[in-house]
Each structure stands twice: as structure tokens, then as C-alpha cells.
Image (spheres, grey):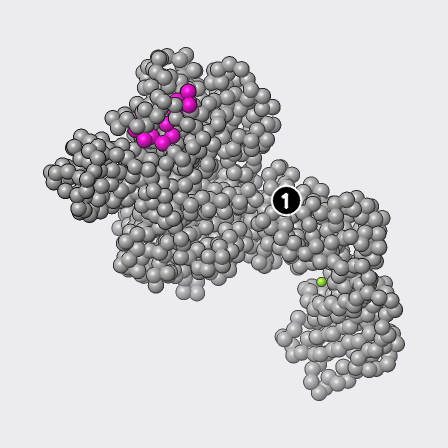
Amino acid sequence: MSHGSGGRAMAQLIHELFVTHFDNDYLRAQNDGACFPLPAGSGRMVMATDSHVVSPLFFPGGDIGCLAVHGTVNDVAMAGGRPLYLSAGFILEEGFPLADLKRIVISMAQAAKEAGVPIITGDTKVVEKGKGDGVFINTTGIGIVPPGIDLAPSKIRAGDAILVSGMLGDHGVAIMSLRENLSFDTAIQSDTAALHDLVATMLAAVPEIRTLRDPTRGGLATVLNEFALAARCGMLIREPVIPIRPAVNAACELLGLDPLYVANEGKLVAICPAERATELLALMRAHPLGADAAIIGEVIEDANHFVQMETAFGGRRMVDWLSGEQLPRIC
Amino acid sequence: MRERLSLRGLVQGVGFRPHVHRLASELGLSGWVRNDANGVTLEAQGSASALQALRTRLLREAPVHARIEACESEALAPTPDSSAFEIRQSEAASSGQAAIGADTCTCPACLAELFEPGNRRYRYAFINCTDCGPRYSIAEALPWDRARTSMAGFALCPDCAAEYEAPAKRRFHAEPNACPVCGPQLHLLDAQGQAVAGDAIAASLALIQRGGIVAIKSLGGFHLACDARNAAAVARLRARKQREEKPFAVMLANVASLATLAEISRAEQADLQSTARPIVLLRKRVGADAQLTGVAPDLAWLGVMLPGTPLHYLLFHDAAGRPPGSAWLDQAQSLALVMTSANVHGEPLISDNTEALAQLADITDAFLIHDRDIVIRCDDSVLRRLPGSDHAQFIRRARGYTPAAIPLTGAGAGTRAGANVLAVGGYYKNTLCFTRSSGTRSEAFLSQHIGDLDRVANCRALEAAVNHLQQLLQVKPQAIAHDLHPDFFSTQLALRLAAQWQVPAIAVQHHHAHIAAVLAEHQLDEPVLGLALDGVGLGSDGSAWGGELLRVDGAHVERLGHLQPIALPGGDRAARDPWRMGAAALAQLGRHAEIRTRFADQSGAALLAQMLERGTPMTTSMGRYFDAAAGLLGIQPQMSFEGQAAMRLEGLAASYGTLQLRSPLHEIENADGLLQLNLAATLNALLDSTLPVAQRAALFHAALIEALAEWAQAAADASGIRTLACAGGCFLNAILASGLRAALARRGLRMLEARLAPSNDGGLALGQAWVAQRALAD
Ligand SMILES: [Fe+3]
Ligand SMILES: [Mg+2]
Ligand SMILES: [Zn+2]
Ligand SMILES: [Zn+2]
């Protein structure tokens, strides 16, 4: 792939690649923008955008392509929205292999198709060699939030239940193992998945859900700290009931990571009134993407807005809000 | 003539007003004395010679625990006074300079009464006087007055009130004064919290002698006690406390009872018998472990303390068969009590009755409890003497020492008192520190040990301690100092309070603070070399420092050198698994291939080797080099408590004795303009030697001491500075500290060490405060 004047032919090639694989009427219309009809019925529109940067680009269980679809679909879903359309913007580094790009585009197309959310507009830029990291993908999603649904962390109340939709830490550990070139006995796969169908099921039955969030970068710990601050409450979770694969635990131990801080790409955290928690849990478990869902704790009164975890040994550990990477601290 | 005297320093809670009253009455002076926010103020009227005598004798004959920092006098016009000298009500104020005393053990005069049959306080567990008893742990606010202590709810009976008001008596204005009629009462409760009938002391002792566990409410919090000579009881306590290997301390009746257990020097005896009643770490005698099975297994040191409260004495009195008089106090006794802090897994010491009943029900068989509240919990202090040193070193500074003030020099090259600041300490072994200034003087108040901030309760305790100490000291900080690490609760608390109080927050690099703590207590305000040998502290370059040679000049610090970086595979995880650091050492030595074979029994060895090949974050931590050595020698692949590997290594080296190093096993290299200390030859020697493990442990220590001394010398030669301040957790290693002291002395270098504050992170807040004062003065 080249940049500059000689790249015009290439740009055309890429454009055709997208049209072929994303394949829909909006793209075929060859306009700079896509016009679509207003969705029927009432409710509110939701729009979310996310730029995807991941290294390595291909990992067990997925690649940057499907991740870019899932990430934005999930952001729309976490607002309670049903995603309708996506846009995709590519920033390619000069010299990026076309074969890799093709693989990524096919994966994106398939993810969009499975999710039922077409990519209806897009853009590509090529930057000089050394000014990018292979490929960056920005996706923006538009969706519709059904009437009566208004999710916000500020609605969280002491006494509410904290639920997660499944095993935590898979994505981050899969990426990290690959980056560290570690071959574990049990291969750990990224959990990347689109959660809007699970969310629709949950909200249809329990519209009282206070808020939802996908624990991506920073993991469960960061989401709970954000919730605690927004709701001016404390969060108490219980170590033994947090779903984590033994293989993920083992890998985290080796790598010195705390799985609570590790990224997920196909999980959500839900806060709901305690009296609806069991029903919600049953619903989630009945869905293929929520089979390992669990109630992991509750919201408590706490002027300090601490997130705390009752450990397997007793006592309560602080689940700090980290400013960045997990830095060593044992003196 | 009439004169007003204002006295500052530790003059409250030490019997100072009675002292003034006695002198003034004796000298025929009229006037008054009272406690106020600044200390003690008095006005006296009489002849010039009598006033002169008062001034002299006031200082010369001051009560034992008093410490007078300043005495200002002012001439006044004579006024018509009543003829008698009186003690006036304390004056509360919103800001002040008063200090409060630490808790002290029962004094000899009170002990004599305690064991005198017929005395109205015979065997009364709360006997005290102006010379002894609870202070800091029961103080809610200053000035020191019964109404502002947890004794407020106990109204004095006529007999006690008479003592309180009789100037000639030892209990004249003794604020916690009490007797069986009017004071706190002792109770024994079973594990379910039900009262047990009969004599609480006798029943507790009987239970302990049968192998039971009793939770005892001591001065600063609850202890869990059992018979240290009963292996089954000790094992049961360990199992119930889930404290697998961490050493327990024992309480013995007196020094005579120690004979077969530990060696003791005269200085150590003085430490043990000091009124602060710390735990003193003593060298075990051969056979000690056989007598005290499971108390402090595999370690060279035994933590010992003597009874500190009347309650503790009563248990030993019962064990001795309740002899009348005080003679038994010096006679050897076989009763040895394990006395370990009552807490749940790293959580704060339990100090409240309700909390104790709720949290200790599964651990203890009974509660020996009373109704005098502990306002501020204070763990036992722990100290130890190193061979060749003329001072004791704190491992933990708490009960008996806090809140004693540490005097500081002025800031801005000593021209003016340093500002009032708050420093919130680090993460592990957290303490906090306030400085308070008046005139040209400034003092540091380092809090009691608070604990590790990975626990929610310790974080809350830190915040509570900030409020309580501020309340006691009535001080308004002009800045808040904290560690560079962004994620510590202490850092976040500092930022929050700084925003709230609208004062600057000042980040102080971890090892700068360690060195500064030493400079603070030595009152040295000139450029020095700093040698920080530590676990991990965040460096100014964002990496994990811990073996650093610094040049410290007040708020300014320059890194002159560091240990050769070594991999830290798995971050903090590596600090718990010395075998990982052993593997990191092999990687550093280019001996990757040996990782899989040497650590074949570790399931993660192959993967760790892969990680090390790819590269991991690095550290220059000395503590991790100790772990690496322990890992390479295979003596402690995993740790169950912090510092365990280094302690084992030290224990083994001590068992071998002195080792003469044939040739140096280090190199000093130039790495980007810094002096880098390379210990590869030392590590290779550990690996390739066929010597016994103990000898190799001794070799490691000897090589390290030589290397560090040479390294310091190189920095001294380059900088022209010949004073080396040493700090960091590694200086708790007796062989290292003593060996380095001797090696530096041979090179004509002056070594400064921590004495008043712990060398580990427990002293960090003091250093942070000192740096912040200087940053504000710049
Ligand atoms: Fe430190
Ligand atoms: Mg996202
Ligand atoms: Zn006394
Ligand atoms: Zn009384």
C-alpha cells in the first residue's frame, strides 16, 4: 500500500474492497454520506463512536475488524439502544499488507452481518510509514432507545444488585498472552461479541435496570469505580462469586495482573434494583452470551465511594481506581 | 512582684500543674496555673527571690515525662490575689501549641499499691497516677482534661476526688484517676459474649493455662493471648487467625524470666523496661524454639514485651500465686503469654468492645474486657538493637511513642520555622505526619502505625487519624505531601484534602522521602548523599526504583546511581515469589536456559522463562535482589508474609557467622552518566558455589556490604560529600546495617541512620513532611 499520488489507484482498490464485502445499498449509491429513513415509532436516538487500536491486530477469537464492530454496537447497546447503522473510518499505514486488510474487512463484514447492523458509510486515509501502527479503525454507531428506557449511573441506589454477564478477563489475557508470546495449556480466546440482543432481552423484561456498561479497558474495577463516583455510593463485591476462568486466573497470576482490571469485549455490568436481580439473572443465563452471568455484589452507602471486595480469606480489599497501568507498589 | 510564665512542650498529662502548685505553695507564692492550647500558663506573685526559685526549680525538678521546649516570662503588675495558689480550669482554644503525652506503663508507686493487700486499689486493673497510665489512647481533644478523655463518663468518688484535689498527693489532677468504686470495671465474657461469673483475672488465667485463647483489651487495642509454652494452643491460635508463619510476640513477667529464651544486652533490657513498653526483638537462645514451639519458627529473633498495664500485671500476679508486696515482680516466672494483635487479616487492630465481640467470636474462647473506651487505637511498637549500633531501631512505631514530637530545624537554611504541613505517607505500613511551628521552632508529629492501604478499613483509619491528630494538634496545614504513586489511597486523599483546604499538594519521590526522614530527625539541613535500599518505590522516571544513590539537598534530589536493573516478572507478584526473582537473576546473567531446570518444581517456570526472554518491566530495587538471592539459593520459593525471604536469608547468614570476602564481587559502571552497581559476580558466585547454603547466604551479605561501601565511596569522591544518610526497608537487615556501618567508617564516611522513626515505609511521612517544608521555603 502506498501513499500520495501513486496511491490513487490503491484508494480505489480499497473502496471496492469495502463495497464488495460490506455490500449494501447505501454504499453502492456511492455518495459521500448515507441517507436513511427515520426509524418508525417513538423513543430517542443514540450515537456512539469508538476508535479501535489493538496490537496484535489478529488474536485468538477475533481481530481488530470484528472488534471495531462489536465495540461500537456495544456502546450503543449500553445506552439501552438498538443499533441501526455503523460508519467505518480506516487509517492505514503505508505498506500495510493488502491481504491483512482484506482479512480485517471480511471479518468486519461478517460481524456486522451477524449483528444485523450494516456499515453504511466509510472513509480511508493512508499515513506515511512509521506514523501509524498498521491500521486504526474508527466506527460510529447510530441506534434507537425504546421509550421508557433511560439508563444512567446517577440512577444507582444503595441496595441495588451488581451483575456481570459472564467470565471476566478473557479478551485482555488473550491479547496479553499473545503479546508476551506465552503458550498456555488452555488457549484463552477473546470474548469479543455484540451484546445488543442480550441487552434487548434484559431491558424488555426488566426496564428498571439502572445502568449498563461494558467493562473494556480498565475492566470491572474501573467500571465499578466510575459507577461509585457517579452515584455517590460504595460498591461491595465478593471475590468467590466473580466468574473468572481458572485459566485466566492462572495466566493473570503469572503475568502479575489483577483480572478485575483486565479488558473484556463481550461482557457487560448491570446494576438493577435488588428485587429484580434474580429474575434478571435467570434471563441473562438463558441467553447464549450470558450463560455464566452472576450477581457479584451490591451497591452500599459510602461517603468515600470506595469499591471494596470481600476476599476469600475474609477482610475487605480496596479495589482502587488506577490512573493507568498496574504499577508495582510492594515496598 | 507578679510574673506570668508560659511553658511549651510536653507539659500536659505529665503532672505539671500539680508540680507547679506544690512548688508555688512551698515558696509561699499566690496566683494560678492552668493548661491551655499552648501548654501550661501560670501567674505567680510574691517576693523576687521566691519567683526566682520557682523559675529554677520548675525546670530542674520537672516531672519525669515532661519535656519543656520553651519557658517565656513576662512581668505583670501585682494584683490582689487570694492567698492560696490555685489550679484553674483549662482553657480550650481553636489553635495551639500544646503537646500530649504517650501512654506509659504502670509506675513503681502504683505497682506497690496494686499488690498491697488492704490498699483501696489492691488488684484494681485501672490504677494510674500523674506519672503513669493511659494518655494518647484515651484523648479526644486538648487541653488534657478528664472531660476530653474517655474517662469523662466516670464521676470521681469522694476518695478519688479528694486525691485529685490534694496538692501533696501523687494523684493531684491525675485526669484518668480511678478506683474500684468509681472507675472502669473488668469483665470476662465467653465467646458468645455472655458474662462469666467469678474473678475475671483468675478465670482468664485458668483458661489460658488450659490451652484456651483469650482476647484481652489492652491499652491501645485488643490482644489475643494464649500460653506460649503450649504448642497446641499456639497452633490453634495460628489456625484461627489464619496466620500461618508470621512470628508472634510473647509477654513475660520480667527480664529474669527471659534467661533460657533469649540473649539480652543492658541496652535491650532498658528498651524492654522503658515506660513505652515496646516489643523488643531479641536474639533467641539455642533451645528457645523447643520451649516456645511455633511462636516464631525459623527466625533468629524473638519478640518480647513486659507487662504494660495493671491488667497485664494482674495475670502474672495470679500466676505467681498472688504474693503480697512487690518482690515477686523481679522473680523469674515460667508464664509466657503469646500476645498478638487482635485483628482480621491485615485489618486494623480491634479497639472497640462491640467490634471485638463481633469479629473475634470465631477466634477467641473468651474476652477479658472493660468499659474504658480506647479513643485512638495504637498497635504495639516494635524495636530492636543491631550489633555495633548505639541506638535502637524502630520496626513499628506506635503505642508508647506516638504522639511524641520530633523536633525539626527551621526551613529556608534554618532561617525560619518550616511551614505547618500534613504528609500522608505511602501505601504499606502507612503512617501520617503533621508538622507544627511556632516562632523559629517546628515539630513533627508522626502518627502511630496505621497499616497497609490495600485494606478498606485501613484507608478509613488513615482518614480518621488525619482528623483526630489535627483535632489534637489544632494545626492548619499549608501544604499536603504525598508519594509520587498516583494510585495510593494516601495520594488520592492528599489531592482531595488539598482541593478542599485550597493548599498545594506536593508529590515527593519515595526514596527522597526515605532519606529526608533521616535528615529530619538528625536535624541536618545540608546537601548529603542518600543511600536508599528498599523494596519498590515509584521513581521520577516512572520506573520501579529501590536501590538508589541520591544527592539530597532539601527539596532537591538528584539520582547519582542505581543498582543494575533486574526484571520484575509479574510486577508485585514477583515480590511474593522469590523464585521469580531468582529466574529474573538468571535472565540478567544470560543464563536463561537454567530457569527451567533450576525451578523445575515451579509450574510456571517455563512460561516465566518465555516472559523473561521477551522482556518485562525492570526494577532497581535492593529488596528484590534479596529475593533473587533467596530464590537462587532455593530457601524460600514463595513468601507467606512480607520480607520473609530476606529474613530467612539473614537468619542463615547469621547462623554461619562472619565471612571474610576474598575479592570484591561487584562492578561499578557508568550507565548514562549514573553510577550503576552491577552485582552479577555476586549472583554468579551464589549459583556456582558448592558451599553450604548458610555460607552462601553469608557470602551474599559480605559481597553486598563491600559493593555498597565502594559505591558510596565513589559517589563521595565524585561529589565531595562525605555524609551518607541511609534509609529504606533493607536497613532492617541487621547484618547489612551493621556491616555497612563498619565498612563506611573504615572509609571515613559518616553514616546517618533512622532512630526516631522506622527506616521502612513507616517513616516515609516524616520525610515527605520535611521535603514539603523545604519546597515551601524555596
Ligand atoms: Fe519504601
Ligand atoms: Mg467501547
Ligand atoms: Zn502511677
Ligand atoms: Zn474512686
Magenta segment, prevailing SS (helix, strand or loop): loop
Element at label 1: strand
Residue at x-position 58% and y-position 49%: A303
Residue B191 versus residue A103 in the image, above or below:
above
Residue A136 versus residue A282 in the image, above or below:
below
Please state which of residues A59 and B728 is positioned toward the viewer in this rendering: B728
Q: Is residue A185 visible?
A: no
Residue at x-position 69% and y-position 50%: A157
Please state which of residues B217 and B742 is positioned toward the viewer in this rendering: B217
Crowd band around label 1 with a 10 angstrom C-alpha radius: few (<14), some (14–19), many (20+): many
Where's residue B161, x and y in %? Answer: 35, 25
Locate the N terminus of chain B by quadrant: top left
Q: Is B724 left or right of B356, judged from the image as shown?
A: left
Where's residue B418, x and y in %? Answer: 33, 55
Residue at x-position 60% and y-position 23%: B192
Locate the C terminus of chain B by quadrant: bottom left
| Amino acid tagged 1 | Met
The region drawn magenta spans B171-182
Q: Which residue is mark 1?
A: A309
Q: Is B342 left or right of B277, judged from the image as shown?
A: right
